[in-house]
Amino acid sequence: MARKALYKTDKGYYQGAYRESIKEHRRNWTLAQVTGTLAWMWKHVATAAERAECLRLRVAKSVDNPFVANVANIPQDPKSADDPAPVVAPIPAAAPIPAAAPIVAPMPVAAPTNDRVFPYMPSLQEMDVELPVFVLGPDGRAAHDVRERLLGKRGSDRIDDLIEEPERKRWHGTHWLGQGATGYCAHWVRTDEHNIIDKRLAVRDIPTAPPRDWINPINWRDQLPREIAILRRLHEQNGHDHNIHRYEGHNLDARKRRYRVYTEVCELGDLLSALDPYSRDWDRRRCQFTWHGKHPEITAAISNENGLNEDNLDLRVDAVRREVFERYLLLDRQSEAFSPYEEYQHLSLNALEQIAMEDIMEHPKHIPEAFLWRVFDQLVDALLIMQRGADPLIGDKRWKEIVHKDLHLCNIFVKRTEGGPGSHPPDDGIITFLSNDYPQVVMADFDTSFFDLQDDDEEYQDNPEQYVWERPDGRYAPESFQVFQNQQRLPIKLTSATDVWGVGQIMWNLVMNIPCLYTTFGPFFDRGEESYGRRLNNGIPHANDDLANLLSGDEPFPVSLKYSEELKDAIWSCLRYMPAERIKLAELKEITVRNMLFHLGNPESSGPLYINASVENELYRVGDRYNC
């Protein structure tokens, strides 16, 4: 059998050697920066002797790469393929004695003119990657053939040509990870020459953007789409060491007005699905309590031989509203109105009848408090790096505070800590983690994140006007909505305080053991005759003292009684109505570190953690053989 060369081209041997040297001596460079610099060096820096050596290796079909890179040839700053060749600056001549400036009449100020240059976008040569066609259908989903292309099931759409690798490496699209509001994410694995998985990537494809959105400067930063620019800035600050989702690279396709982002795989999924073993049991208990306590007439009607009939219902019961009957009798009907004690609307008719006949169960198992403090601390750590960066100046970029703006359970991913594998997943898919190997969470999905375009002293301000939500959503801080801004004398900017509220909302969900299986539902008052069931961000201001009616432990939400007052106090301090009154990140970090260490050392609050595993993700672990 003919010997297979390590690389097909002279350039492959050259760039392969220099890539390793760049990784060693320019450790903060991103994948895109390394790739661009290598292309520039081959074009402008490679000497005749180096090219001859690479030619010899290619002709000999060398399976190794003995080519030695010269570190002195690597530029101090990253380059792109289209950057000009380096020039040697001539020695400047002595400056002549300046002549006296003549007195001239002032020139008229030229009127501003339009041009066709978009300085906030990269050159077209830097956006020339050919990505698969990706346009969403009228239902907001991609057609089957499009999904097949994005998974690389057709040879021309594989990512091997987009990520430069040695010839013996090969990428495979395995399965879908999910669809978010702005794109599809697929799971890819890389195999070596022995068909062993040695790397995994989450490949997120963003569909074709409308022209007006693609050229809008609000959506660009650092000559990149805003999401990519933020991921790169955080990567340059080693954000992956501070619980930020690790960025691995990107592709831009100018002709199709879309891009692709490569990130690490968090094999345990998002926080909502990972903690399903807790939320399901507590949800069932709440449904039982609701039926027995709020709807005795429905329970009685079910026991009739004629079944449930609206005519048999006692309409005088104050706690029962007509839409409850409609949801029960016509399960396909949906209503925008939603009350925290009507969660059984997602259950089947049989499940509802079973609940009506059951006694209220004892308290199910709850999430260990030590794990909650660990999550709390890791999320605060991520916000701190977003707020101030690890280094205020990277290259020529001055650090600006990054606001996530979209914090909720589904945008927090879960992965094993190094050396903390947990138990082997049994048939039910539940992995058990002891306190010494609790999994790690990372902050992800920066597609709506931003940092200010304008400085504070500029007349026009993009923040908050360009970044507020128009429609109410229980997950987001009050100032995130236009209705809040309209109530203020002056606009209130979205800052790290906005994300502090978001973290408080996530922790409220965790202390309640995720009271609703709907991602759009947020904190509500669970005590108080006037405020019961009212959301914190419904547009009506609340006093800080009102937060005592949050996490009260009253039925049907008693699980918060399982947790310390220190934890609930910290959450209350995050959920204050006005941003300026919320706890500051540095102070919150001190609280989370202290309590995390205490509870990890306390056997009563650091019990085993049960995580719902993704069966598909468990099939493709690094080190396993790839079975296509």
Image (spheres, grey):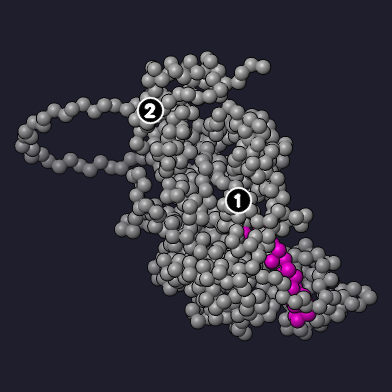
Q: Which of marks 1 and 2 is in front?
A: 2
Mark 2 Cα-neighbour bin, 10 Å: few <14, some 14–19, many ≥20 = few
Q: Nearer the viewer, residue 139 or 2?
A: 2
- Residue 102, horizontal then vertical, whole percent: 7, 37
How far is disc 1 from disc 2 in space, using C-alphas?
37 Å
In the rendered structure, find residue 315 and report the number of the disc placed on it: none
Magenta segment main secondary structure? helix
Q: Earlier in the sequence, mark 1 or mark 2?
A: 2
Q: Residue at x 62, y 85 (%)?
A: 529
| 297 left or right, relative to 465 | right
Q: In this view, does 186 lie above or below 337?
A: above
Identify the secondary structure beneath mark 2: loop
Region of the chain picked out in magenta, as a range: 271-294
Mark 1 Cα-neighbour bin, 10 Å: few <14, some 14–19, many ≥20 = many
Q: Which residue is drawn at 43% across and 56% down?
A: 385
- Residue 122, horizontal then vertical, whole percent: 43, 37
Identify the secondary structure beneath mark 1: loop
Specify whether residue 488 is in view: no
Q: Which of 395 and 596 is in front in this view?
A: 596
Specify whether residue 440 is in view: yes
CB under 8 Å between discs 1 and 2: no
Q: Identify the image quadrant of residue 150.
A: top right
- Residue 146, horizontal then vertical, whole percent: 67, 39
Q: Residue at x 57, y 30 (%)?
A: 161
Q: Which amino acid does label 1 sit on?
A: Cys
Badge 2 is on which residue? 70
Is residue 282 covered in magenta? yes
Q: Residue at x 62, y 33 (%)?
A: 192
Badge 1 is on which residue? 266
